[in-house]
Structures are given as structure tokens and as C-alpha cells.
Amino acid sequence: MTLVNVVRELVSYLNLRNMEELLRFVKNTFMGTPSLMKPLNYIKIEQLL
């Protein structure tokens, strides 16, 4: 399973409408944990859509 498929499944599972909501969810969930957020800086949003 590719990263793109994983993200799509996660968006669907969390009943989110789009990628922006997923990023907001991740930010709110892991706020204060920069080590978990750092890998997201390397992922281009276009790759996930």
C-alpha cells in the first residue's frame, strides 16, 4: 500500500472531507510534538490528492 493510499484511507476512516481537514486533524492531535510533525514537512500535498 502506498502512502497516497494510506492517506486516502485515513481521510475516509476519519470521515474528513478533504486533505486540509486531515492536516488540521494531525496538527491538533500532535500539537506540541514537533518530532512527529517533522516528516510531514517533506510530503507535498499534491502527492496526497
Image (cartoon, rainbow, N blue to C red):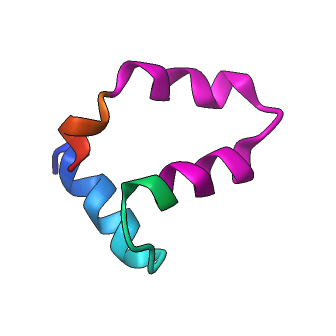
- At a point 61% along the width and 57% down the height, the residue shown is 25
Camera-side residue: 7 or 47? 47
Q: Is residue 33 left or right of residue 44?
A: right
The image shows residue 3, relative to residue 24, as above or below, that is above
Q: Is residue 47 left or right of residue 34?
A: left
Q: Is 42 in the magenta?
A: yes
Q: Where is residue 11 in the image (x, y as percent from the top left)?
A: 38, 67
| Region of the chain picked out in magenta, as a range | 22-43
Q: Position of residue 28 (x, y in %)?
A: 72, 51
Q: Position of residue 32 (x, y in %)?
A: 83, 33
Q: Is residue 5 left or right of residue 18?
A: left
Q: Is 47 in the magenta?
A: no
- The kind of secondary structure the magenta stretch mainly shows is helix
- At a point 38% along the width and 55% down the height, the residue shown is 19
The image shows residue 14, relative to residue 29, as above or below, that is below
The total of numbered circles placed on residues is 0
- At a point 27% along the width and 61% down the height, the residue shown is 8
Q: Outermost residue, right direction? A: 32
- At a point 50% along the width and 61% down the height, the residue shown is 21
Q: Position of residue 43 (x, y in %)?
A: 34, 27
The image shows residue 12, relative to residue 21, as above or below, that is below
The image shows residue 46, relative to residue 22, as above or below, that is above
